[in-house]
Structures are given as C-alpha cells and as structure tokens.
Image: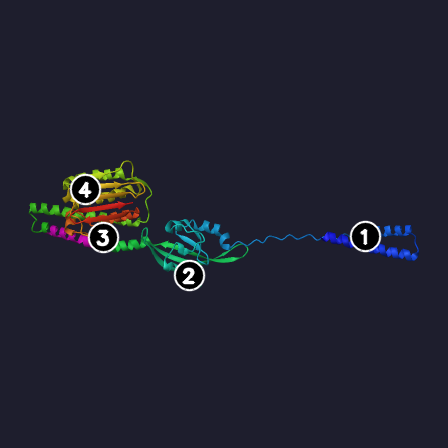
Amino acid sequence: MERLMARLRRQSFVLLVAIAIAVIAAVAGMNGWGVLALLLVMTIVVLSSAQPIEPKPIAKERPVVEEEPASRSLLPEVSATLSALDIPVMVLAGDASVLFQNKAAEKAFGEVVIGAHISARLRSPGILDMLRETIATNAPNQIEHSERLPSERVYIVRSAPVELVVHSGHAERLYVLSFRDISEVRRIDRMRSDFVANASHELRTPLASLRGFIETIQGPAKNDLKAQERFLGIMFDQTTRMSRLVDDLLSLSRLELKSHIAPDEKVDLVPLLGHVRDALLPLARDVGVEMVLHLPEGKAEVLGDRDELVQVFENLMENACKYGQEGKLVEVFLKNDAGTPVEVTVVDKGPGIPAEHVPRLTERFYRVSIEDSRSKKGTGLGLAIVKHILTRHRARLIVKSEVGKGTSFTVRF
C-alpha cells in the first residue's frame, strides 16, 4: 500500500512539471518540437532525481513468554533433595495445594494428586489448623499426630515456610510439611510400663511359691526326701511357667516393634497347616482330641512371614485342643475361593465362651478362667501375640462362640 502511494505522488509531481513547461513554452513562443524536447528532458531529470520511498519494515512482535513460577522451575531440584530423605515430607503452595511429596510420604500416607489440596489426603483437623496458622503468620509450628490404620503410628508433624528464588530473582514462598515418626519411642515407653505392671503381677505367685517351698525344704522338710521330691517337681513347673511368660513377653515386644512393616513374601498355607497339625499330634493324643484338616486342591498363597504364621496357627489349634477337649474334635477349614479373601477357621466342639468375654480375648493376660488357664499352662499372652502378628499381616481375627456348642477362630487375610 505504501509503495502505491509513493508512485502516485511521483506521477503527480511529473504532471505538474509538464504543465508548467507547457505554459512557459507558450508564453515564449516556442514551436511544438521544442516544447516536446524540453518536456522530455525535464521528465528524465525529475525521475532520476526522485528518491523512491521505501516502506518501513513491519516490526515483528516478539512472543510473550510467561515466566515460570519459582515452585515449578525448582521442583526437580526439590524432588532430588527430598527424595533422599527417609522421613515423609510434602511441599505445599500458599493455598495448601500439594506440589511435591517424597517416596516416604507416599509409602506412609498414599499417593497424593499433585495440585490437589492437602485435605484430600490428610483429614486431621489438627494438621490443617496448624498449616493454616503457618500460612497466615509465616511462622513454624508443630503438633503430635496419631494414625490408627493400618497400624498405630505417632508422628511429630512440623510445618515451616521456605523462600525459593529462581535465577531471575523472583521469589516464592512455599511450605514444607514433615513427619517425624516417634511410634517406637512411645511404644517402648508403654511396653516398659506394661511389662512392669503385668509381669510383676504374673510373676508374684510363682515366686512366692518358690520361696515357700525353698524355706520348707531348708526347714521342716530338710530330711524328708519324699516331700523334697514333690516340692522340687512343683518348683520346676513354676519356673517353667515363668520361663514361658518371659518368652511370650519378649516375643510380643519384638512383634510390636515391627507391626507397621507388612511382610512381602508368598507363603502357601496348605503345607503350613499340615506342618502345624503334625507338630501338635502328640498333644492332641494326650488330651484325646482328633484333628481334621479340610484343605482345597492346589495352593493357597498369602503374603506373610512363614514362622509368624506357624506361630499363629499353632496357638489357635493348641488352644482348641486344650480348651475344647470335651468335644473330642478339632477341625481346620481353609477357604480359597476365587474373588474372596483367603480364610482359615479353627473350630472346636468344647464348652464355648460366654459372649461378654469374646471382645477381650486378645487383651494381654486376659483369661476367661484364670484357674483353668493356669492348669493348662497358659500365660494369657497367646491370643495377644496372634493379634499382633495378624495386624502386621493386615489380617483379621474373627471369634464366634456359643456356650455349649463350641468356638471358632477365623483368620481372614
């Protein structure tokens, strides 16, 4: 368009010059050839002297590049640093949306959708209130938080602001949410107090018996060999009972320390149950009980620790033989149907358990009948051990009992 306008201006200029020359020639009395020659010369001069007007180049607009937020540009560096930590850590934006979580946080709380609000995963009012206060005041805070599922965990949760600066100098304030696991410390403290209370109670009776027998042997029965032999037999039983009690307490403490770590090896329950039955056959014969296994064809695999599962089913089947010996029969059913959880049920035909006792069977040192339990050399810790093993295996123990008809213990994986 600009080129066209320039050409029109030059043509108009030449036309005006030609008209002016024609007027001058007419006034001077020049003939037609003279006028034509003068007009031609002037046109050439004008055209050669006229400078063409070049259009200005159109400046190209530079694309507008939006500066990347500091949080996104630094996320690779943040993830590379925080991923190496073995404690759960999350990085949040000013609106409490999750920008990053490390592997430890994914393992502890599950994967969070990046960009989602923190409340989509953590619904604790205490944590959310603490985080809101940190964002509002820009000051660090911390609280104690407990998780009950899949196992009980206790954390010191800390929120703190952090400034991230990119190369351009732009800064953005983000917030780091960290979780320090103090479950082991709390569990050890509780275990220590429980051990002192329960162990002192359970050990008091056999220790008093041992002291009395020793004093009797040293005094009135000093020369009575028959009395000494009888007393020594009772003393041996009492020391054996104390030894079993200590072993069970140590086993329980070890299980509690690793209850949050789920086992990941495959265990076939079919040969395992057969092994447990074979190991308990002498006991079953002594109490006059027949043990019958009902096993499916093929394998029945679960994720677990083989030794711990042997301990579970030994405990359940031994209890069924001891406390259900009146029914003369103990049956073990293994259910492994497609699409349903694997279940192992131990059923006895004994006297059953009153309904008010069933919910408390897995408590430490809880007994339906103290005298009956002690006469059968029980410590009161067997089902507590079973419960802790199954908690670690993410399995459930279901107890059903009817007085006069027997009891069933079902392990559902």
For the point 86% across and 52% down, the residue is: 39
Tell me which numbered mark, 1 or 2, is placed earlier along the sequence.
Answer: 1
Residue 133, image x, y percentages: 41, 62
On whether residue 212 falls in the magenta region, the answer is yes
Q: Distance between the residues labelled 1 and 4?
A: 123 Å
- Residue bearing mark 4: 330
Q: Give the numbered dot on residue 359.
A: 3
Instruction: Describe the element under mark 1 as helix, strand or loop.
Output: helix
Mark nearer the viewer, 1 or 2:
1
Q: Is residue 137 above or below residue 149?
A: below
Tell me which numbered mark, 3 or 2, is placed earlier along the sequence.
Answer: 2
**Dot 1, how many residues are within 10 Å of its Cα: few (below 14), some (14-19), or many (20+)?**
few
- Are circles 4 and 2 on residues that touch, CB within 8 Å? no
- Residue bearing mark 1: 49
**Dot 2, how many residues are within 10 Å of its Cα: few (below 14), some (14-19), or many (20+)?**
some
Instruction: Describe the element under mark 3 as helix, strand or loop.
Output: helix
Tell me the kind of residue under disc 4.
Val
For the point 87% across and 55% down, the residue is: 22
- Are circles 3 and 2 on residues that touch, CB within 8 Å? no
Tell me which numbered mark, 1 or 4, is placed earlier along the sequence.
Answer: 1
Find the residue positioned furthest to the top: 298
Tell me which numbered mark, 4 or 2, is placed earlier along the sequence.
Answer: 2
Per the rendered image, the range of residues in magenta is 194-215
Instruction: Describe the element under mark 4 as helix, strand or loop.
Output: strand
